[in-house]
Amino acid sequence: MTRDAGPTAPAAVLFDMDGTLVDSEKLWTIALDDYAAHRGGALSDATRESMVGSNMTRSMKLLLADVGIPPTEAEVDAAAEWVAGRMAQLFAQGLPWRPGAPEALREARALGVPVALVTSTIRSLTEMALDTLGRDTFDVTVCGDEVDGRNKPDPEPYLKAARLLGVDPAACVAVEDSPTGVASAEAAGCLVVAVPCEVPLAPGPNRVLHESLHEVDFAALGELFARAA
Ligand SMILES: [Mg+2]
């Protein structure tokens, strides 16, 4: 059933992917650990945590440094290729949803406003994830290798999604799970619905924290703007 958006609905709903819609951060941990072992090292918990919500290039630099290999451009490229290949294997085995994510996407679509996917993950892996998420779910998808290196926490991924949709980012709601992603969305001017996954999130003036997507009332998202005004 489609609801009228009404004057208080957001201009668009912009969803992060990893850790927000799909429980893929755990798969990233497997792939990153496997690469570290492949190079004879180990990835520390602190370094892994700092990568959550980050893009491939930055993550590979951190990973190589942790393993004790100078992160030259060639090493970063080789590591990215290896990890992307491992992730493709893991994605192909099936991508688990985050709790409430299928319902959240349905409710966001029922608002009658555009819905976008704004992910730090590269296009080739995102295309595999769209087999689970549904290609028709999103009006626009922005991937980590499509923002000229200006990845989250830079605002560019969210700004690009808003540009492609022709909407004001300050009138959009972003749904995020990580400190990096929340910082990006807030820098773009979006209001943020934050559901932490792997890393805790602190409260903030332009974000609403929830423990699960099940708790989010998508039909009432417009009220966030009234509250923030
Ligand atoms: Mg995320």
Image (spheres, grey):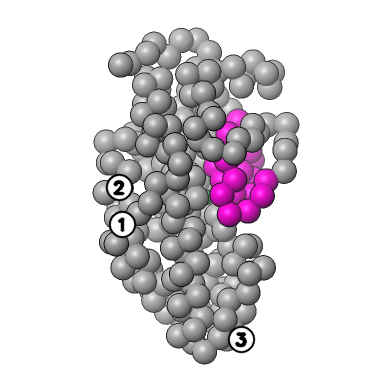
Q: Which residues are magenta?
A: 176-201
CA gap, disc 3 to disc 1?
32 Å
Residue 1 against residue 190 in the figure, above or below: above
Give the mark nearer the N terminus: 3 vs 2. 3
Please, what is the three-letter code of the amino acid marked with disc 1? Gly
Q: Which residue is mark 3?
A: 68
Q: Which residue is mark 2?
A: 132
Give the mark nearer the N terminus: 2 vs 1. 1
Which marked residue is nearer to the observer: mark 2 or mark 1? 1
| Element carrying mark 1 | loop
Cβ of mark 1 under 8 A from ligand 1: no
Which residue is rendered at x = 47% and y = 18% of the image? 219
Q: Which residue is mark 1?
A: 94
**Quarter occupied by residue 116:** top left
Which residue is rendered at x = 66% and y = 49% of the image? 200
Q: Are marks 3 and 2 in contact (CB under 8 Å)?
A: no
Depth check: give the residue in front, 1 or 153: 1
Q: Position of residue 56 (x, y in %)?
A: 48, 64
Give the mark nearer the N terminus: 3 vs 1. 3
